[in-house]
Each structure stands twice: as C-alpha cells, then as structure tokens.
Image (cartoon, helix red, strand yellow):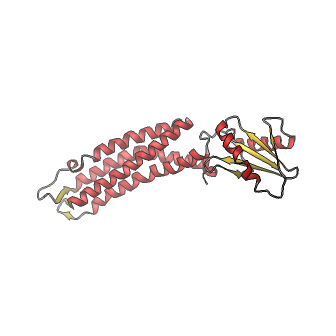
Amino acid sequence: MLRTFIFDDSKSQWREEEHALLSHDMCVILDEEKELIYLWSGSKSTRQRYNIGYGQLKELISNFPELNIQLMLTKKNFPIEIQKKIEAMLESAKNEGVSSLIISRFMTIRAFFISILAVIIMPIISLLNLSTALLWPISSINLEVQNTSFKSWINTSRIFIMLTILFLAINLIIGLIEVENQIIIFSLVGLIICFGLILYLNFDIYLFTFQSGSTLTIFYILKSEIIVFISINLFSVVIFELPSIYKFISFLKTYRKYIF
C-alpha cells in the first residue's frame, strides 16, 4: 500500500495527503509493503523547504515503528508504481484547478486567510462604533455627547482603522512574496484609503460645528452632520471592502482545503 505525505511549512511537519500534489510541494511516498520511502520534490519547491523537510523525516518514520523503513533519494527514475502515484496526484490537482494556485506556501495561505478576514471585520466594527452616535441623546435637532464619550468614540474607530492598516500591510507583504497582483493592488488601495481615514479622524473635534449650548464638557452636534460623517466613512470603507470580500470568497473557494 502506498501512502503519501506532503510537507507543511507552517507546522514544519509532514501531513498525509492522498489527492492533490502541487509543483511547489515536497512529497514523501511510503511503500509499506516494501518498507521503502521515496522523497519527491516539485520543480517550484525551494532548497530551504527541502532541507527542513528532510530534517523532519526521522519524525515521520518514527510513526511506523513496526516497519524497517529505508529512505530512497532520487530526483527521477522512480519505480513505475511510485511515478504513477505522483502523476495521478498532480493530475488530480490539475483537474481540480489547484495546479494554478498562485499562493504556493501553507504559511502564507493561512496568514492571508487571517489577515484578509481581519481587513473585512475591522472596518465594519469601526463603522458600527461610529453609528452608535445616532443613539446619543437628542436635544431638538442636535445630538448631545460628553467630551470624554466623544473622544472615546473617535479614538475607538481610529484604533480599528489602524489595525486595518496593519493587516493590509501584511496582505501587501504576502502579495509581494507570492507575486499575486490582485492582492497587491487591493492592499495598496485599502492602505491609501485607510491612511486618508486616519487623517480625517485626526481632525477630532474640528470635524463638527458645535451648536449653541455646547461647553467644554458637553457637545451639541447636528444630527445631519453626524449622518454625513458616518456616510463619508461608509463610502470610503466600501471602496476597499467590496474587493476584499470578493477576494476572500474566491480565496476560500480555491484554498479552503489548505487553510485548516
């Protein structure tokens, strides 16, 4: 019986995989019957991955104490059954559309999954926070808010936008590493908009015209000004959120089996 294992960079260990094999993978094929193990390295696999994976082979072999396994190192001329297994896995990946994967490392696949999810969630939380202003006490056509609450309101959204910038920067780095143009473009657009939002939010109390009756501790702000302010933030966020959501969905369709 042949069993196949692919080296997982993110966990620095071998994991069993019976179906898809990519050109960037390093694969071990175990022939339990002959007690032989073959090491295959794809054309796009790196020397660093090979060295780390080779170093972890002892741990993999230790999982089969009942077998007296011998390691066979060869770049080509595998036995016919081994070659057929490799070709079948490569073909399976091709049929599933997996062979055209742009992101080629387990580590960057999982890092991008987390970072793009954060890019989607953080601005939404920021907008929800800004929307709480509509729940402030109403005095005539004005909204009433204490100075400390106003500062907290602005600063909370500023923090979430700064976190968004952090995760967009991570996405940009991943895009540059993997040479994924769509990620690079979406990340740059998001970064430009988020830096603009940070500058906008930094105007703080100067964003609004305080109405008659306002003091150093109590502010009265036109409800219409708050709605315009929220709308500007919403419009800005939507510009990069929609592409991010699109990318997230397409990413899940392609890479979901490599995330967990």
| Outermost residue, left side | 212
**Count of numbered circles in the view:** 0
Q: Residue at x 54, y 49 (%)?
A: 113
Image position of 103 (left or right of 63): left
Q: Position of residue 221 (x, y in %)?
A: 19, 56
Q: Is residue 8 visible?
A: yes
Q: Is residue 48 left or right of residue 245?
A: right
Give x and y (percent) for residue 140: 17, 62
Q: Position of residue 245 (x, y in %)?
A: 49, 48
**42 left or right of 140?**
right
- Name the residue located 33 percent from the left edge and 48 percent from the top edge: 233
In which quadrant will I find the C terminus?
bottom right
Observer-nearest of 249 and 62: 62
- Which residue occupies the foreground of this view, 242 or 257? 257
Q: Residue at x 71, y 44 (%)?
A: 54
Residue 99 vertical position relative to residue 118 in the rendered view, above or below: above
* 142 w.r.t. 57: above or below: below
The x and y percentages for residue 123 are 39, 51
Depth check, front residue: 93 or 56: 56
